[in-house]
Image: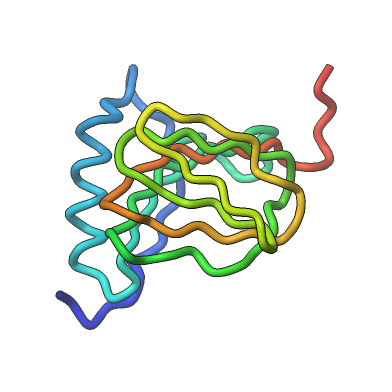
Amino acid sequence: MSNEVHAARRGPEQPEGGIDLAGAARELLEQAHGLAAGRAARTLTPGAGAPLKQTLMAIAAGQRLEEHRAPGSATLQVLFGDVTLRTGDDELPLHQGHWAVIPPATHDLRADADTVVLLTVAMPGHDAG
């Protein structure tokens, strides 16, 4: 494992064609295992100020995202693995193929196994219609 806590930040890039989510997930999980934080992420939507932000995130088993609030309405899709989404005293176990709305309250996320999720956030300040 590296002494690095997080991977270097990089801006999202406009993809050429589609993205191989399974391949990107494998790469991120390998990267997560090499970092002290045990997680790695890649923003899929290009450009700052976009109305929708999607992030592919790999979290090594036993690691967690500490309590935080989403910057806007958000959903979580588990591509593979198992996580627990916790809001206060409520816990929601999610497994491969599961999808859930992230509560607008403070929450955290624990990886119960090596996991890759797709986080989608509707950024505030953008008209949906």
Q: Name the residue located 61 percent from the left edge and 45 percent from the top edge.
A: 48
- Residue 81 position in % (x across, y down): 30, 42
Using residue 116 as the reference point, say whether residue 77 is left or right of it: right
Q: Nearer the viewer, residue 92 or 16?
A: 92
- Residue 114 position in % (x across, y down): 26, 51
Q: Quadrant of residue 60?
A: bottom left
Location of residue 36 with respect to 44 vertically, above or below: below
The C terminus - image quarter: top right
Q: Nearer the viewer, residue 80 or 90?
A: 90
Q: Quadrant of residue 105?
A: bottom right
Q: Name the residue located 20 percent from the left edge and 46 percent from the top edge.
A: 27
- Total numbered badges shown on the rendered structure: 0
Q: Nearer the viewer, residue 105 or 112?
A: 112
- Residue 44 position in % (x across, y down): 44, 36
> What scheme was used to colour the molecule?
rainbow
The N terminus - image quarter: bottom left
Q: Quadrant of residue 53?
A: top right
- Residue 64 position in % (x across, y down): 43, 65
Location of residue 102 with respect to 32 vertically, above or below: above
Q: Name the residue located 27 percent from the left edge and 78 percent from the top edge.
A: 4
Q: Nearer the viewer, residue 47 or 60?
A: 60
